[in-house]
């Protein structure tokens, strides 16, 4: 058993040679009881594997004709030789999302105006070349200037002044 010293508090004279009384820990068990046998079970690991995220996109579903009734198109195989690549989501959809943000405060109504941003995620490779091609495509298609912001570490581009359909057309044209 392990022994612990109690700290006694007294106002009397303390004898330096006298050791404080010992306290024995009744819940402590010897080290021999902690030694356990390790058993590796590969049968139960299948339940753990189900929790891991999928690392690859599943195979593209086969259809009789493209585009499908929902408008879905598979990526071109092999992809065009571009310095960038836009990966699809795990459901084989384009990684395009819209976001509403506050813009400027209208001082007469004291309300914020909202701005719709389109965000393109999962861009690999030269993201600045992708942004340049995307803005050129959108300006030619829409006939006006397009504002964009590149977030290189996260691999995403924010676009102001375009719609999701326009960006989908750009991705389809490039075979993503």
Image: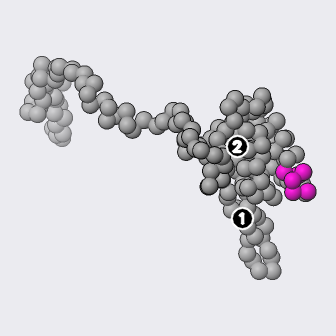
Q: Dividing the picture into quarters, in which one does residue 113 lie? A: bottom right
Please tell me whether residue 107 is drawn above or below residue 82 in the rendered image.
Answer: below
Tally of marks: 2
- From the top left corner, tell me how far across and down residue 146 is, in percent: 85, 53
Q: Secondary structure at mark 1?
A: strand
- Which quadrant is home to the C terminus? top right
Q: Nearer the viewer, mark 1 or mark 2?
A: 2
Give yes or no for residue 116 being in the magenta stretch: no
- Crowding near pointer 2: few (<14 within 10 Å), some, many (20+)? many
Left or right: 68, with 45 as reference point: right
In the depicted view, which residue is nearer to us: 56 or 157?
56
- Crowding near pointer 1: few (<14 within 10 Å), some, many (20+)? few
Q: Which residue lies under the disc numbered 2?
A: 156
In the depicted view, which residue is nearer to us: 50 or 93?
93
What residue appears at the point 11 percent right and 27 percent down from the top-left corner? 29
- From the top left corner, tell me how far across and down residue 98 is, in percent: 68, 57
Please tell me whether residue 106 is drawn above or below residue 10 in the rendered image.
Answer: below
Q: Residue furthest bottom?
A: 108
What residue appears at the point 85 percent right and 41 percent down from the top-left corner? 132
From where the camera sits, is residue 158 visible? no
Q: Main secondary structure of the magenta part?
A: helix
From where the camera sits, is residue 116 visible? yes
Q: Dividing the picture into quarters, in which one does residue 154 lie? A: top right
Residue 102: which disc? 1
- Which quadrant is home to the N terminus? top left
Which range of residues does the magenta coloring cover?
A: 138-143
In the depicted view, which residue is nearer to us: 100 or 19?
100
Left or right: 102, with 25 as reference point: right
Label 1 vs 2, first from the N-terminus: 1
What residue appears at the point 69 percent right and 35 percent down from the top-left corner? 76
Q: CA distance from mark 1 to mark 2?
A: 20 Å
Evaluate if marks 1 and 2 touch, with contact meaning CB atoms under 8 Å apart. Answer: no
């Amino acid at each position: 058993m392990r022994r612990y010293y109690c700290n006694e508090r007294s106002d009397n004279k303390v004898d330096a040679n006298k050791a404080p009384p010992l306290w024995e820990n009744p819940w402590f068990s010897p080290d021999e009881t902690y030694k356990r046998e390790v058993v590796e079970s590969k049968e139960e690991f299948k339940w753990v594997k189900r929790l891991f995220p999928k690392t690859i996109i599943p195979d593209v579903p086969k259809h009789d004709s493209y585009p499908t009734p929902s408008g879905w198109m598979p990526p071109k195989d092999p992809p065009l030789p571009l310095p960038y690549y836009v990966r699809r989501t795990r459901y084989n959809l384009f990684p395009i999302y819209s976001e509403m943000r506050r813009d400027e405060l209208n001082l007469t109504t004291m309300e914020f105006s909202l701005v719709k941003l389109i965000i393109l995620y999962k861009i690999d490779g030269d993201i600045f070349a992708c942004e340049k091609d995307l803005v050129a495509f959108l300006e030619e298609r829409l006939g006006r200037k397009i504002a964009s912001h590149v977030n290189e570490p996260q691999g995403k581009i924010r676009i102001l002044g375009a719609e999701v359909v326009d960006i989908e057309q750009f991705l389809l044209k490039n075979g993503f």
